[in-house]
Image (spheres, helix red, strand yellow):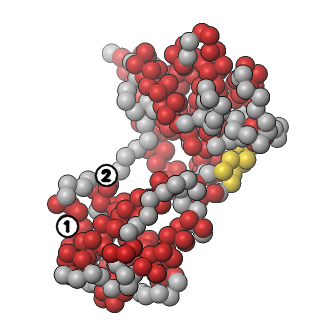
Amino acid sequence: MAQSKQLDKNHYPELKPIIKSWEDYLQSEKRASVHTYDAYLRDLQKFLHFLKEYLGHTPTQNDLKSLKPADFRSYLAARRKEGLSAASMARAFSAVRAFYKYLRKTDILTNDAINAVSSPKLPTRLPRPLSEDMAKRALKEVGDFAAPATQNWIALRDIAVLTLLYGCGLRIAEALSLNLGDLDKGDIMTVLGKRNKERLVPLLPAVTEAVDQYVEACPFDIKKNQALFIGVRGKRLNARNIQLAMQKIRQALGLPSSATPHALRHSFATHLLTAGGDLRTIQELLGHAYLSTTQHYTDVDTAYLLDVYNNAHPSAKK
């Protein structure tokens, strides 16, 4: 794991051993990303600091065990006063829930009061895909904005990355974590998704062709066990490079701010569903743990079809 932050356990002497064991659990068993790990520790730090002020003393294990639903609600109210959005509050409280779940799992302590407190409700945000025409134009024209003509390989690289996002429905982190050898298995590849869960994804000829053109033009000799997509210094490519490339495309084509690299993944799912794709199959391709997550695309599909109708049908234009 890359360098990450640590919670100052010395401020909570009695809780120091269990905080350390939870940190180890997040890293070794949960294999949380550095970003997730740091966010969890930061949110736990906020919770413990609140308890210190709220209780009037440094919290102990007995305090954690004795908290009532009203106490947890007071914590949420305090975070709301800090100006946190509903989404940030929900994330912060999920870290506290995860901590308590770990304490119960390891028989350190149990407090069911936290289960009586609901997280802040979030408005349903539907995925925002690009139209088929705009998705194709984005892939076609990214090369014109990616790099100077003297660095054609960078243009081909960015085309290959975006083609993977749209043609295979990958998350940008999944695409950039690929090694060259991962695409050396014919017309299918294994993708390592969230929580290190593997899934099989078909490789379309257009995707294979885009990747082959990039690899052939790349000035670096990439080995099969090395990063497939690399930057100008030969290191694994950072997601920011692709985000900037997509930003240039948005400006050039007049696309909305929602036209991000991740929108190509949404487009992959929506266009498959529109073409009659099975929801369970799309769930597997996207690597969603729950079908309910994939079902959001049924709402998008309806809106997408209406948009296509309104823009294409003669009677709708009258």
In the image as oriented, which residue stretches furthest toward the front? Answer: 10
Q: Which residue is mark 2?
A: 123
Instruction: Say left or right for 224 vs 262.
Output: right
In the image as oriented, which residue stretches furthest toward the top? Answer: 149
x and y, in percent, of residue 191 in the image? 68, 47
Identify which residue is drawn at 66% across, 50% down. Answer: 192
Identify which residue is drawn at 43% across, 87% down. Answer: 109
x and y, in percent, of residue 125 in the image? 37, 46
x and y, in percent, of residue 123 in the image? 31, 52
Instruction: Say left or right for 198 vs 117.
Output: right
Instruction: Say left or right for 6 vs 149.
Output: left
**On screen, residue 233 above or below 314:** below
**On screen, residue 153 above or below 306:** above
User: Which amino acid type corresponds to the residue marked 1 in the rendered image?
Assistant: Ala
User: Which amino acid type corresponds to the residue marked 2 in the rendered image?
Assistant: Pro
Q: Which residue is mark 1?
A: 77
